[in-house]
Image (tube, grey):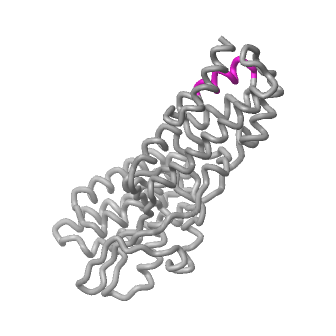
Amino acid sequence: MTDTLLRSLRERLLDESEPLAGMLRKCLLLGAETGSEALRDWARKELNGYGSEDEVPKYRKVGGPPIAMDSISGYTLAKNQIIARHQLPREAWEYVPDEFSFKQPIEELEQLAGQKQLSFASPGLAYAQTIWNGQLDEFQSIINLYYVMSGTVLAGVLGQIRTKLVDLVADLTADTPLSELPKKDQVDAAVSHRIGDVYNTTIQTTNGPVAIGAKAKASTEGLTVEDALRLLDEVQRTAADVADTQRGELLDALAELRASVESDEPDTGEVVKKVGKLRAIVDQLGVASVSAATGGAVQALAELALNGAFG
């Protein structure tokens, strides 16, 4: 099996059309055969995705993509305006990262890389929108902020992973015949040299999204409960755009959610339940400004709740 495994992995690496996922699964087997936890850990994280406490390799990090904006000025609606991060209010910069970490499983990245354009939002952008709207006059409003990115950016990330694999296997087979099993120390050294010590976990503090796709929502890393409550303030501000007959239900749901979050002993289940209720009401309303403001707030609170922020 050793001869078949090494030979198959080496031959498949030379075929550019071979999916990365299959080759990484072979790396899992090779790590098990050689006793290299370093190789198994790296292959497993690439296949399953990196967790919130995992150090993300440099090759999975890219510069922040352009930001698209939908806005209203007077009676004029403008959509898909491209702006740079420095055009946001300075107070919002800390919530809008200049570097992104892609933590998704390799197969998800491969699917996304085939798309012509990706767009996605984040709680950080939602908070930046709140700050910006607070500085505009009553005849101007930012309806939505979201990132846009070409799928070729992810194709570049995948290309780097493929190159890492080629270098890794080349190191393993340079002094070891395909019919023999590399020693554990050889495998560990090759992983450390070509990949880095990414199999050691550390607290991940990089602020950036973890979910990429068509208007996908991103991680709440870097946001606090207080920040999420400010996002709820923005939802309440946009409630003025809702018809009088429907506004009461929205305001009641907001008040209930805020009361649960600000309770002396907030209950995670209650917070999640009320977040779901608010989201359902907003979806039924179908008011763009309210939906945009609510998106970041409800996701931020839901993730904070599920991560134990409310006890």
Q: Residue furthest left?
A: 245
Q: Is residue 247 left or right of residue 96?
A: left
Determine whether 304 is above or below 81 in the image.
above
Q: Look at 57% across and 58% down and name the residue there.
A: 100
Q: Residue at point 57% right, 49% down? A: 157
Question: Quarter-wise, where is residue 161 in the image?
Answer: top right
Look at the image and tell me whether residue 229 can be seen.
yes
Q: Main secondary structure of the magenta part?
A: helix
18 sits left or right of 207 in the view: left
Residue plotted at (65% across, 45% down) = 53
Q: Is residue 173 left or right of residue 278?
A: right
Q: Is residue 34 magenta?
A: yes
Please determine whether, in this image, residue 33 is positioned above or below residue 305. above
Task: Say which of 287 and 164 sits in front.
Answer: 164
Residue drawn where x is 65% and y is 20% of the image: 7
Whether residue 308 is visible to the viewer of this picture, yes or no, is no
Magenta part of the chain? 25-35
Closest to the observer, 149 or 68:
149
Quarter of the image holding residue 171? top right
Quarter occupied by the N terminus: top right
Q: Nearer the viewer, residue 37 or 202?
A: 37
Residue 11 x, y percent position in the rendering: 60, 25
Residue 197 in magenta stretch: no
Residue placed farthest to the top in the image? Answer: 1
Report the number of discs. Answer: 0
Residue 278 locus on image (x, y percent): 32, 56
* Residue 36 in the image: above or below residue 135: above
Asked if 16 appears above or below 279 in the picture, the reply is above
Residue 10 in the image, given as x and y percentages of width and height: 64, 26
Instruction: Judge by depth and name the residue closer to the eye, 249 or 1.
Output: 1
Q: Position of residue 305 (x, y in %)?
A: 50, 50
